[in-house]
Image (cartoon, rainbow, N blue to C red):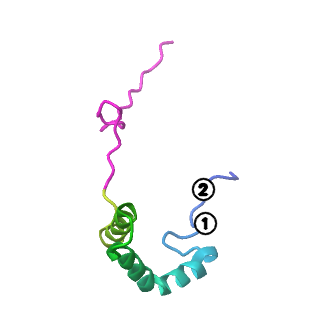
Amino acid sequence: MARGGAREGAGRKKGSGNKATAAIKEYAQKHSEDAIKAIVNIMNDNDTPAQTKLAAANSLLDRGHGRPAQAVTNEDGTKLFPDKIEVVVVKAKG
């Protein structure tokens, strides 16, 4: 009988919550509205430095619309990852 390796039905099911952080997540979600209001107040405060206002505005945009996709490129601007990977199997002589 083979042992080890992945077994059907083993492990945590996809999409199931992490019990260790569930309480923290629930607590944070209860304060989400207040946190958003605080970010808006920072962004709208005339005494707040421009860098802090920008950070608050970006924070709101990230939460409301998601972070923009980031391109992964080499220094010369070419793609870092190939579009296609091809495997060639060569039969050895002998």
- State the residue lying farthest toward the top: 94
- State the residue lying farthest toward the bottom: 30
Q: Label 2 sits on what residue type? A: Ala
What mark, if any, has residue 11 been given in the picture?
1
Helix, strand or loop status at disc 1: loop
Q: Nearer the viewer, residue 87 or 21?
A: 21
Q: Residue at x 52, y 80 (%)?
A: 28
Seen in the picture, residue 18 relative to 58 is either above or below; the reply is below
Looking at the picture, how far across and down is residue 26, in whole percent?
Answer: 53, 83
What mark, if any, has residue 6 been given in the picture?
2
Q: Nearer the viewer, residue 11 or 91?
A: 11
Looking at the picture, how far across and down is residue 5, in whole percent?
Answer: 63, 52
Residue 77 located within the stretch drawn in magenta? yes
User: What is the CA distance from the residue labelled 2 to the residue labelled 1?
Assistant: 9 Å
- State the residue lying farthest toward the front: 47
Q: Is residue 26 left or right of residue 35?
A: right
Residue 82 placement: quadrant: top left
Q: Residue at x 58, y 79 (%)?
A: 24
Numbered range of the magenta stretch: 69-94
Looking at the picture, how far across and down is residue 89, in whole percent?
Answer: 41, 26
Number of numbered markers:
2
**Front of the two marks 2 and 1:** 1
Helix, strand or loop status at disc 2: loop
Q: Do the CB atoms of the residues marked 2 and 1 lie less than 8 Å apart?
A: yes
- How many other residues sit within 10 Å of disc 1, few (<14), some (14-19) or many (≥20)? few
Q: Label 1 sits on what residue type? A: Gly
Residue 66 placement: quadrant: bottom left
Residue 10 located within the stretch drawn in magenta? no
Q: Residue at x 57, y 67 (%)?
A: 9
